[in-house]
Amino acid sequence: MASTTATRVHGKEREELADILRKRVSGEVRFDAFSRVLYSTDASIYQMEPVGVVIPRNVDDVLAVMEVARENNVPVLPRGGGTSLAGQTVNHAIILDFSKYLNQVLEINTEEGWARVQPGIVLDQLNRQLAPHGLMYAPDPTTSSRACIGGGIGNNTCGAHSVIYGKSLDHILEVYAVLTDGSQAHTLTGQDVIHRVHDVPVAVVG
Ligand SMILES: Cc1cc2nc3c(=O)[nH]c(=O)nc-3n(C[C@H](O)[C@H](O)[C@H](O)COP(=O)(O)OP(=O)(O)OC[C@H]3O[C@@H](n4cnc5c(N)ncnc54)[C@H](O)[C@@H]3O)c2cc1C
């Protein structure tokens, strides 16, 4: 059985960690009891109180969180809409909520049929911006009014029309990711898909 050596963080240590993060992060550092309860559930039956929550405003915030977490041996758990059904977004970790600030369409290339987006954009919002160009991001889960692109990549989300149009990973051309060692990765995927979705940090992987 797999085991973890990650540090459990409570009380004074939690406050110290929050103080370090507040000095490094321009986004919101929410380590109070109310926020921890808010982020202790997702759409699954599971519940676990996080160490705290960071709502990053930019990529530098994400890099800072990864560095602080690594230095303090604390896990990091990215979150989009939190609509996962198997407890994917609850853990004793620093929750990184991408949905509040990192939720923009950065570029739409109508000729080549791709869009460059940030990971916290909700699928329906993306499609509302693509529609005037005659484009659409195909994966259509029931939760498309809440679910984000980053969460769709994490879950390889599919939908009612995926038999015809494919699931999330069939439509991702490029991903910029922050890895757990703090390095940044850029991956290229399929050649003949119609949408390109990328910007640091679509994924935080280990
Ligand atoms: C009523 C209901 C109906 C559903 N119907 C469907 C359906 O039809 N099809 C389907 O596929 N799923 C369905 N789901 C599951 C879920 O809604 C989808 O998988 C959805 O795409 C998840 O998106 P999210 O933004 O909520 O992801 P989250 O739940 O926030 O995250 C999903 C995973 O991705 C990771 N993640 C999130 N953001 C990032 C990031 N920036 N970088 C790295 N990792 C990240 C998280 O850590 C987690 O592991 C349903 C769920 C519910 C409650």
Image (tube, rainbow, N blue to C red):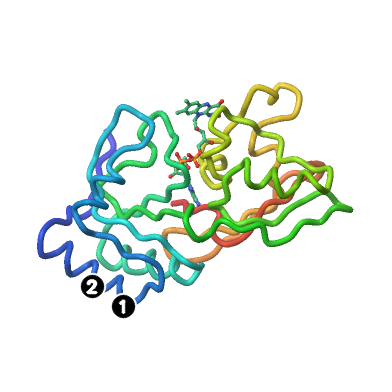
Q: Quadrant of the N terminus?
A: top left
Residue 23, numbered label: 1
User: On the rendered structure, is 57 left or right of 4?
Assistant: right
Amino acid bearing label 2? Asp
Q: Position of residue 57 (x, y in %)?
A: 47, 66
Q: Vertically, is 120 above or below 140?
A: below
Q: Quadrant of residue 144?
A: top right
Q: Secondary structure at mark 1?
A: helix
Which of these two is toward me, 162 or 183? 162
| Crowd around label 1: few <14 · some 14–19 · many ≥20 (10 Å) | few
Question: Which residue is drawn at the image coordinates 68% and 62% (left, top)?
Answer: 106
Amino acid bearing label 1? Lys
Q: Secondary structure at mark 2?
A: helix
Question: Which residue is drawn at the image coordinates 25% and 65% (left, top)?
Answer: 72
Q: Position of residue 18 (x, y in %)?
A: 24, 67
Residue of label 2: 19
Which of these two is toward me, 205 or 51? 51
Residue 14, numbered label: none
Question: Which residue is drawn at the image coordinates 37% and 41% (left, top)?
Answer: 89
Q: Position of residue 151 (x, y in %)?
A: 51, 43
Q: Vertically, is 69 above or below 114?
A: below
Mark 2 vs mark 1, CA separation in Å: 6 Å
Query: Is there a contact, CB below 8 Å, between mark 2 and mark 1?
Result: yes
Q: Quadrant of residue 11?
A: bottom left
Question: Which residue is drawn at the image coordinates 25% and 35% (left, top)?
Answer: 47
- Find out if the beta carbon at label 2 lies less than 8 Å from the nearest ligand 1 atom: no
